[in-house]
């Protein structure tokens, strides 16, 4: 019987982490499948995934893109694939273990058992639960979330979170072609549009741990996009029914 859940993991140069994260997700009693969306990683990430597909042919899938096009477009490609393959619960998760795979079942239960339309692995719903980040980045992330909450009026404490479970009905209801942002602003835009459509989003407390291996993809351009993107989202919502 096919799993009802798929974990989308976008990758670009994650050879240090990809096999370990795949093996951990596929080791759980709850039957999660995995879709890796790789942006033509020059370090051989995709080759590692393809080798593992021989071991997990019914549970591990890969979608290869010709070039690095941004986190948002990677996830949208993954969402389309997952919907085409009739998954009911579709997850976003990083490859670098900053999101603890043990929390997948909690996000799943928030939707499948408790009836939420989307669940968010939240770093800030019970305080500040971030490990191994420098204080400057903790403060930037924390106050960015406060900024988003102030501008959008969404009741979420971690709108930039990238550890999320969506139900298929939510993604089917969204116009994925209208999603415009690529970095952190993509995460905000997804939540804002779902919230604006009156779907129920719940925050599940997690502990976020900074990557131990590989290189962060954070950049100044991503931060700038998020800062201005929030304002554009809110203004745009005034002109929509």
Image: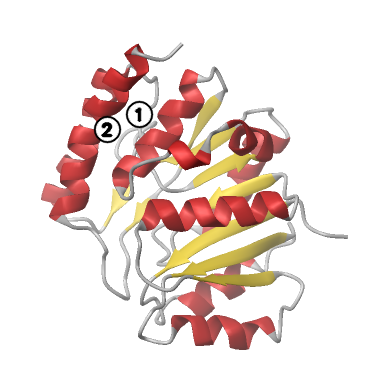
**Residue 216 x %, y %:** 26, 65
**Residue 105 x %, y %:** 64, 49
User: In the rendered image, which quarter is residue 111 located in?
Assistant: top right
Tell me if mark 1 has few (under 14), some (14-19) or many (20+) residues whose alpha carbon lies within 10 angstroms of its own. Answer: many
User: In the rendered image, which quarter is residue 73 located in?
Assistant: bottom left
Q: Is residue 84 left or right of residue 117?
A: right
Q: Residue at x 23, y 58 (%)?
A: 218
Q: Circle 1 is placed at which residue position?
A: 157
Marks 1 and 2 sit apart, C-alpha to C-alpha, by: 6 Å
Q: Is residue 209 left or right of residue 54?
A: left
Q: Residue at x 39, y 26 (%)?
A: 156
Q: Is residue 90 left or right of residue 145?
A: right
The answer to whether marks 1 and 2 mark residues whose Cβ atoms lie closer than 8 Å is yes
Q: Residue at x 66, y 72 (%)?
A: 60
Q: Which residue is farthest right? A: 1
| Residue closest to the eye, 97 or 238 | 238
Q: Circle 2 is placed at which residue position?
A: 145
User: In the rendered image, which quarter is residue 139 located in?
Assistant: top left
């Amino acid at each position: 019987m096919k799993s009802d859940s798929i974990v989308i993991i976008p990758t670009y140069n994650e050879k240090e982490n990809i096999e370990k994260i795949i093996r951990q997700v596929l080791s759980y009693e709850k039957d999660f499948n995995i879709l890796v969306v790789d942006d033509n990683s020059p370090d051989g990430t995709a080759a590692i995934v393809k080798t593992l597909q021989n071991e997990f042919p019914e549970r591990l899938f890969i979608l290869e893109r010709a070039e690095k096009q941004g986190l948002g477009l990677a996830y949208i490609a993954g969402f389309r694939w997952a919907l085409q393959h009739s998954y009911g619960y579709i997850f976003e998760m990083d490859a670098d273990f900053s999101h603890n795979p043990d929390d997948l079942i909690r996000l799943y239960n928030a939707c499948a058992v408790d009836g939420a339309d989307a669940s968010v692995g939240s770093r800030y719903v019970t305080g500040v639960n971030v490990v191994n980040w420098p204080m400057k980045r903790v403060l930037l992330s924390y106050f960015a979330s406060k900024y988003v909450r102030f501008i959008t009026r969404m009741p979420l404490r971690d709108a930039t979170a990238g550890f999320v479970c969506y139900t298929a009905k939510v993604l089917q209801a969204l116009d994925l072609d209208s999603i415009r942002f690529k970095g952190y602003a993509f995460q905000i835009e997804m939540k804002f549009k779902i919230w604006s459509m009156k779907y129920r989003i719940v925050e599940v407390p997690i502990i976020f741990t900074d990557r131990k291996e590989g290189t962060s993809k954070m950049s100044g351009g991503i931060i700038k996009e998020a800062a201005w993107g929030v304002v554009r989202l809110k203004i745009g919502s005034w002109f929509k029914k």
